[in-house]
Amino acid sequence: MKSLWEDGEAARFSGPLGLRVYTSRLLGRERALVLHGGGNTSIKLRERNVLGEEEQLLYVKGSGSDLVDIEADGFAPVRLARLLELARLPRLGDTEMVNELRTSLTRASAPTPSVEAILHAVLPHDYVDHTHADALLSITNTGDGEARVREIYGNDVVVIPYVMPGFELARFVAGHFSMSAHAAALGMVLMNHGLFTFGKSARESYERMIALVTRAEDYLKHHGAWAPVSRTAPPLTMAPVEIATLRRDISTQAGNPMIVGVHDDPRSSAFARRPDIAKISQQGPITPDHVIRTKRVPMLGRDLLSYANAYRRYFEAHATGARGAITMLDVAPRVMLDPDLGMLTVGRTARDAEIVRDLYAQTMDVIERAQRLGGYRALPAQDIFNVEYWELEQAKLKRSAKPPVFAGEVALVTGAASGIGRACVDSLLARGAAVAALDVDPGVTTLSARPEMRGIVCDVTNLEQLRAALVETVRAFGGLDMLILNAGIFPAGKRIAELDDGEWQRVMAVNLDANLALMREAYALLKLAPRGGRVVVVGSKNVPAPGPGAAAYSASKAALNQLARVAALEWGGDGIRVNSIHPNAVFDTGIWTDEVLAGRAAHYGLSIDDYKRRNVLGVEVRSRDVAEIAAELCGPLFAKTTGAQIPVDGGNERVI
């Protein structure tokens, strides 16, 4: 591992806290050190308070911050003297500890300090860094891990046996770490937990971390335990409807819709096919900070019922097993390993599932390296249980904010690169949905870097591309709950006498045939939606009130409207509701260029603003207005509505 420090880059960060921010971000760049909020850093500073008194503060990473992009206000300033007093208490409940940390802040708006704040405080160094380095965890998670650590580092580190994070760990370290006995130590190894380094400057503490981790990496290389095992694996053979069935069963047991990501890459598939997977995958996490419920399912062929029953037995066992008085708030596993599927990761949101994927990718590396060192050995089951049902974790779950209305649900939007389609994507994302955004425009792939959004280039008139898009959606998110049929074209005006067959067929292919094909292909997935499938068809004012020169467009939208009505009748018994919206005069879409808009306004002798508001209510209808109605039709407010047609046009006299 190489130091990423650059003098020119560091010069942009002023003062000790600024450099602390800089080196924290350097640590955050290394996925082999920290992932998704893991690890923490601190600095001790002397500052004057509002009374002019000088006091020493510990600036420690706040809960919820991520080292990769932390800012100065992501550090919580805590009175150091108070923390040192707390460290001397014989006992302190963790809930009480968090309260004490909060009340010891010097800035009311600061984030809650890390639960390891007292540990940082008792270490007699100005700068402290803490990571969960993969290389070191590969060594500590073996039967003779402590002996190996001492072989690697000698007296350069203090070795602390595993103690549960929180007050007890801080108190233990305070009683065993003295400046005189460990004055020359560069760092501290917490067995099965991670690595701490210290320094008199941000750079020294950071580069000591890099140096100590490099020594662990070199040790693994020397013992032939560094490079990943090279294996090949056949591609996934499970059909989208089978994946969606598993997702439905997982969601049922979890009590709410869940996102399921499928990972059959060679690395994940090879790990799932290890002959010893039943043993190594069930031992426990590589560090208590990464408690992930893992389920290994044996090969069950293509029998979907067997798959469903296997998961159901697992859920029931965990919900009613030897848990005493503990009530599990969520019994669904977060990782599933199967020799036929590879790895499936589960989360309440797409981001949660992505975090689980990243953490377990790290877990696979650590386990395989530890195996080659003599055998992976996690913490005892009781220690893992204590972390998973830690009072702070349970309290965090109970006070979690109410999830967004579409959390755990999956939507697919066509014509999503611009206009109404783009607005629909935004409205669905804002409500917590994972969204597959389809468009023939390649720009759809760059609409968002969020894990909740998957841009897919797709010509909706191409059946194979539609099917491939559905497969990609299911592999990314696990199924399909909502379908927004928005893609369409509005050709230049032509009267019937001038309309050629080619143009008629082109409009029908996009506005009608493609929607029929997508509805047909998506039907089996929508039936499996945990809360029932939903379809919203973006129609047109031209359905109830066509105009001259728009025969192809009006006829295609009218036919699509009839298709939606029939689908509402046919699919209601499957819990799928189908509704239509009919927008009109939405001027912030691609077809309304400035020139076209100016020409139409001039034709009616109106200003552009007046032309935009040429409706009964005198309001402008924007893409977002249409999208919000589409999203609401998928929500609980319209849970008992199907077959509806809703105008979104500000009131049109011909429609009314």
Image (tube, rainbow, N blue to C red):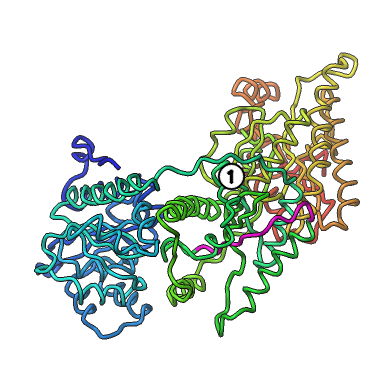
Can residue 454 be seen in the rendering of this structure?
yes
User: Which quadrant: the N terminus?
Assistant: top left
- For this view, does 400 lie left or right of residue 180? right
Q: Nearer the viewer, residue 230 or 98?
A: 230
Picture quadrant of residue 145: bottom left
The structure residue drawn at horizontal position 72% and vertical position 59%, both measured from the top left corner, is: 248
The structure residue drawn at horizontal position 21% and vertical position 50%, both measured from the top left corner, is: 208
- For this view, does 440 lie left or right of residue 279? right
The span shown in magenta is 292-303
Residue 288 in percent (x, y) is at 42, 66
Residue type at mark 1 is Asp
Residue 195 in percent (x, y) is at 29, 59
The structure residue drawn at horizontal position 58% and vertical position 75%, both measured from the top left corner, is: 328
Q: Nearer the viewer, residue 613 or 199?
A: 199
The structure residue drawn at horizontal position 19% and vertical position 75%, both measured from the top left corner, is: 84
- For this view, does 546 lie left or right of residue 429? right
Q: Nearer the viewer, residue 357 or 231?
A: 231
Residue 331 in percent (x, y) is at 61, 69
Residue marked by disc 1 = 426
Say what secondary structure mark 1 lies in: helix
The crowding category of the residue bearing disc 1, from other C-alpha atoms within 10 Å (few below 14, some 14 to 19, many at least 20), is many
Residue 199 position (above or below residue 467): below
Reply yes or no: does residue 50 show up in magenta.
no
Q: Nearer the viewer, residue 166 or 86?
A: 166
Residue 470 in percent (x, y) is at 71, 41
Query: Which SS does the magenta portion mostly show?
Result: loop
How many numbered discs? 1
